[in-house]
Image (tube, helix red, strand yellow):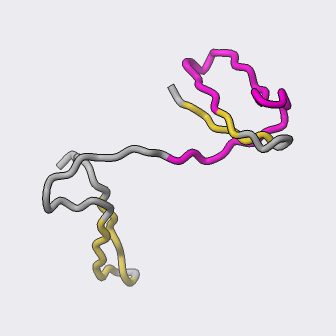
C-alpha cells in the first residue's frame, strides 16, 4: 500500500494519496484548493532501528583498491541475509 506525496502547484499544499490497489480510482485534486495541477515530491522517512551497545548506528563505508582505482562498499544498519 504505497503512499504518494504531492505538492500543489497552485497553493503549495503538500498532501498524500494512499493506493490500496493499482485498480483503485482515487481523487486526484488538491484537498485544499481543489486544483488538479500538482507534482509528486520525494517523501522523507522517520523510520528508526533498534541498536545494541557498540553497534554502528549509521551506514559504514569500507574502501579498498580495485582494478579501476578505489572501490567502496556501503553497509546499512539492520539485519542482513548473511
For the stretch drawn in magenta, the main secondary structure is loop
On the image, which quarter does residue 21 sit in? top right
In the displayed structure, 4 sits above or below 75; it is above
Residue drawn where x is 78% and y is 44% of the image = 12
Please tell me which residue is depicted at 20% across the width and 51% down the height of the picture. 51
- Provide residue 70's location: percent of width, then percent of height: 36, 81
Horizontal relation, residue 62 to residue 54: left or right: right
Q: In this rendered view, identify the residue nearer to me: 72 or 33.
A: 33
Which quadrant of the structure image shows residue 25? top right
**Residue 61 to residue 40: above or below:** below
Residue drawn at point x = 38 percent, y = 84 percent:
69
Magenta region, residue range: 16-44
Q: Quick one: which residue is furthest to the left in this view?
A: 53
Does residue 45 appear left or right of residue 4 in this picture? Answer: left
Which residue is more in the foreground, 10 or 22? 10
Which residue sits at x=83%, y=30%?
33
Q: Position of residue 49 (x, y in %)?
A: 29, 46
Q: How many numbered marks, from 0 up?
A: 0
Above or below, 22 against 32 in this view is: above
Residue 80 point in image, percent of width and height: 23, 48
Q: With 4 as the anchor, is 49 left or right in this view? A: left
Q: Position of residue 16 (x, y in %)?
A: 63, 32
Amino acid at each position: 500500500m504505497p503512499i504518494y506525496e504531492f505538492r500543489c502547484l497552485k497553493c503549495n499544499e503538500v498532501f498524500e494519496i494512499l493506493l490500496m490497489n493499482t485498480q483503485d480510482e482515487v481523487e486526484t485534486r488538491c484537498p485544499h484548493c481543489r486544483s488538479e495541477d500538482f507534482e509528486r515530491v520525494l517523501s522523507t522517512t522517520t523510520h528508526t532501528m533498534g541498536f545494541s551497545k557498540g553497534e554502528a548506528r549509521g551506514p559504514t563505508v569500507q574502501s579498498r583498491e580495485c582494478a579501476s582505482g578505489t572501490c567502496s562498499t556501503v553497509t546499512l544498519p539492520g539485519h542482513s541475509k548473511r
